[in-house]
């Protein structure tokens, strides 16, 4: 890697975003805040997502010390967040259902999908 320290920017952003989000995801009531009250709770799916995001959180913490070892966290995030935006957000926007979209998380996902490929590419 040419500039593995660039990866630390993404890892730090992940920590900043995910510490409060992961805390909220382990509670059915607080999970609603994460999704602006627009995604109903389902314990199985909520805990699956909480587990995924917790793994990214821990991997990002490790990445601050060993940036290259955790570099694949970024493409994984780019892929699953792009998939969610394409399969959930864009169809709702296309169908005039903007009110059904959790805008906070959608904006964060879009910013990550736009910025992390640049960080990943420059780090390599």
Image (cartoon, rainbow, N blue to C red):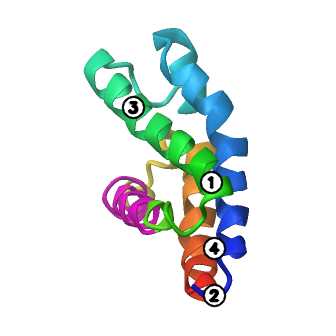
| Residue placed most toward the observer, 91 or 74 | 74
- Dot placed on the residue nearer the N-terminal end, 2 or 1: 1
Q: Which mark is residue 42?
A: none
| Residue placed most toward the observer, 8 or 80 | 8
Q: Which residue is mark 2?
A: 122
Magenta residues, dominant SS class: helix
- Dot placed on the residue nearer the N-terminal end, 4 or 1: 1
Tell me the element at label 4. helix
- The residue range painted magenta reads 75-90
Q: Is residue 96 visible?
A: yes
How far across and how far down the image is residue 46, in percent? 37, 25
How far across and how far down the image is residue 101, in percent? 49, 44
Residue drawn at (68%, 55%) of the image: 64
Residue drawn at (50%, 60%) of the image: 70
Q: Which residue is mark 3?
A: 51
Image-quadrant location for residue 65: bottom right
| Label 3 to label 2: alpha-carbon separation | 29 Å
Mark 3 vs 4: CB contact within 8 A: no
How far across and how far down the image is residue 19, in percent? 65, 33
| Label 4 to label 2: alpha-carbon separation | 11 Å
Does residue 62 belong to the magenta stretch? no
| Residue placed most toward the observer, 29 or 5 | 5
Q: Which class describes the residues within 10 Å of circle 4: few (<14), some (14-19), or many (20+)?
A: few
Q: Which class describes the residues within 10 Å of circle 1: few (<14), some (14-19), or many (20+)?
A: few
- Dot placed on the residue nearer the N-terminal end, 3 or 4: 3
Q: Which class describes the residues within 10 Å of circle 2: few (<14), some (14-19), or many (20+)?
A: some
| Label 3 to label 1: alpha-carbon separation | 19 Å
Q: In this picture, is 8 found above or below 32? A: below
Tell me the element at label 3. helix
């Amino acid at each position: 890697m040419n500039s593995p320290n660039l990866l630390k920017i993404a890892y730090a952003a992940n920590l900043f975003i995910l510490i409060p989000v992961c805390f909220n995801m382990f509670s059915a009531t607080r999970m609603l805040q994460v999704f602006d009250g627009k995604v109903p709770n389902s314990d199985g799916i909520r805990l699956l997502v909480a587990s995924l995001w917790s793994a990214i959180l821990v991997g990002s913490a490790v990445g601050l010390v060993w940036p290259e070892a955790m570099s694949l966290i970024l493409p994984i995030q780019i892929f699953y967040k792009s998939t969610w935006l394409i399969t959930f957000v864009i169809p709702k926007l296309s169908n005039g259902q903007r009110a059904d979209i959790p805008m906070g998380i959608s904006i964060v996902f879009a910013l990550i999908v736009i910025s992390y490929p640049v960080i990943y590419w420059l780090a390599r």
